[in-house]
């Protein structure tokens, strides 16, 4: 103990990378528990930029134990490329551990992801096309190929042949594609196996051992609550469970191993891909917010959809994740926007009002935000480091959010830099805050 979980409380891209990076310094283990290289984040350290898709950014602390848990889906090409890139920049990779039970993204998963989206046409989800959905589908169908399979060519070949069999029809347009040749695919993955062998481990046991000797484990989520396959805006979701409960399943920890759960939210809302977004802002104001927040995807470069902060969705996220703390990022982006709106209920097509997040997709699709207006601020807050130094309007905005959602704010992001953070009293008193304060 302690176990600290970091999850996205909105539709992703809340800045989890930066917060995990901050907390990782004093953690004994950082473990990712779901998703794959559909995630991506950029870390700036001493003016140098680093991009990560699979490996926890904690790896930049020499020797730090960083694990890719069993719940993650791994494209071994992406992982080996990421490793080569880090090695070329002389990063110490000795702390990396990759779960032997994690599932592998195979070339046919990428083809199926592309083909599935093309087939859906106008109804498409807007996936990252990294093969995530088809890989999790094979996992659930018990046709998945796991990391450990790469270490035995005979088993690997048999499993790939079995996985390909039911997909023959969908893959027919690619029948002649060299990527689908059984023998060369097997050889390619055996080679990845050799390259990754030194990192393959029982990451559940590593997690238990760290917790049992009172070490701090940081459970790093990817994507976010509203993209959860069970609790998000289905079908416009990812294929894993980004909610906090999944930290256990995707790592091997038990529910009682978790002590704190931090939900990250921007001071406004963004979403990439299709699906309902009740507080979405179109037009020039939205374009301005997108530019101010540099809202373009790290993984796909797609412009993100932007909107006002959605407290209905956030309160739902707080409940489902049993959040102990909120971390609000990108507060500085709201500077100078004039009066700010916060969504406190939804208005349905027939004028009905919804105080709670609607479970029914048709209701949600037709809902738009109903707002309260709060004063904005014009002061530059990027150099502020204490709560007291924040302009009064900023503190009122934060207090409104915390009260409405019913979760204290522990951390406030006021700029992209690692040091552009304000810890609140609640944050400093938390296990996460105390770990950082020990530096
Ligand atoms: P998939 O995860 O590639 O299958 O995409 C499913 C949905 O999740 C799409 O709307 C994606 O845009 C979204 N998504 C996946 N990963 C991320 C992420 O890291 N940030 C934000 N959205 C994501």
Image (cartoon, grey):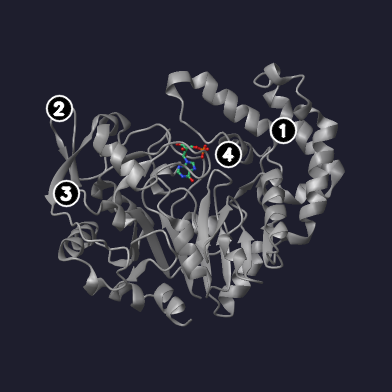
In this rendering, the label closer to the viewer, 2 or 3: 3
Is 187 situated above or below 115? below
**In the rendered structure, which disc, 3 or 1, sits on the residue that comes first in sequence?**
1
The residue that mark 4 highlights is 132
Q: Mark 1 highlights which residue? A: 163
The residue mark sitting in front, 2 or 4, is 4
**SS for tag 1?**
helix
Position of residue 412 in the picture relative to residue 152 (left or right): left
Does 297 appear above or below 256? above
Q: Does the residue labelled 3 lie within 8 Å of ligand 1?
A: no
Q: How far apart are marks 2 and 3 (CA)?
A: 31 Å
Q: Residue at x 65, y 67 (%)?
A: 205
Q: Is there any visible trace of residue 422 in the rendered image?
A: yes
Indicate yes or no: mark 4 CB to ligand 1 under 8 Å.
yes
Nearer the observer, 263 or 154: 263
Tag shown at residue 350? 2
How far, Cα to Cα, is label 4 from label 1? 15 Å
Residue 47, position as x, y percentages in the image: 52, 62
- In the picture, the disc for residue 338 is 3
Which of the two marks, 4 or 1, is nearer to us in this view?
Answer: 4
First-in-chain label (2 vs 3): 3
How packed is label 3: few (under 14 Cα within 10 Å), some, or many (20 or more)? few
């Amino acid at each position: 103990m302690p176990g600290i979980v970091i999850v996205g409380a909105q539709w992703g891209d809340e800045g989890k990378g930066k917060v995990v990076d901050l907390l990782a310094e004093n953690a004994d283990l950082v473990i990712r528990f779901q998703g794959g290289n559909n995630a991506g984040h950029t870390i700036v350290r001493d003016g140098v930029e680093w991009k990560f898709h699979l490996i926890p950014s904690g790896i930049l602390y020499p020797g730090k134990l960083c694990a890719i848990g069993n719940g993650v889906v791994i494209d071994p090409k992406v992982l080996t490329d990421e490793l080569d890139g880090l090695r070329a920049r002389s990063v110490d990779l000795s702390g990396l551990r990759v779960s032997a039970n994690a599932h592998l993204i195979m070339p046919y998963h990428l083809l199926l992801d592309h083909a599935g989206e093309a087939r859906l046409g106008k109804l498409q989800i807007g996936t990252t096309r990294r093969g995530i959905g088809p890989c999790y589908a094979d996992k659930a169908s018990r046709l998945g190929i796991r990391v450990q399979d790469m270490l035995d060519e005979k088993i690997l070949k048999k499993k790939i042949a079995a996985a390909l069999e039911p997909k023959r029809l969908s893959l027919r347009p690619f029948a002649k594609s060299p990527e689908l040749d059984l023998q060369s695919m097997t050889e390619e993955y055996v080679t990845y196996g050799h390259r990754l062998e030194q990192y393959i481990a029982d990451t559940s046991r590593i997690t238990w051992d760290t917790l049992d000797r009172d070490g701090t484990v940081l459970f790093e989520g990817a994507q976010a609550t509203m993209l959860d396959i069970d609790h998000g805006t289905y079908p416009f979701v990812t294929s894993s469970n980004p909610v906090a409960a999944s930290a256990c399943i995707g790592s091997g920890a038990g529910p009682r191993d978790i002590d704190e759960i931090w939900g990250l939210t921007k001071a406004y809302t963004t979403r990439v891909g299709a699906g309902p977004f009740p507080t979405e802002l179109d037009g020039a104001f939205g374009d301005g917010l997108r530019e101010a927040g540099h809202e373009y995807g790290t993984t796909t470069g797609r412009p993100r959809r932007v909107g006002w902060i959605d407290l209905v969705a956030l309160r739902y996220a707080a409940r489902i994740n049993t959040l102990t703390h909120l971390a609000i990022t990108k507060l500085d982006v709201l500077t100078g926007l004039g009066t700010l709106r916060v969504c406190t209920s939804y208005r349905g097509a027939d004028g009905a009002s919804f105080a709670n997040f609607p479970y029914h997709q048709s209701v949600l699709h037709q809902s738009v935000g109903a707002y309260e207006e709060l004063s904005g601020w014009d002061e530059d807050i990027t150099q502020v480091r204490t709560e007291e130094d924040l302009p009064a309007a900023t503190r009122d905005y934060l207090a409104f959010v915390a009260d409405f959602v019913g979760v204290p704010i522990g951390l406030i992001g006021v700029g992209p830099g690692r040091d552009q953070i304000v810890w609140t009293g609640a944050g400093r008193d938390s296990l996460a805050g105390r770990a950082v304060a020990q530096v």
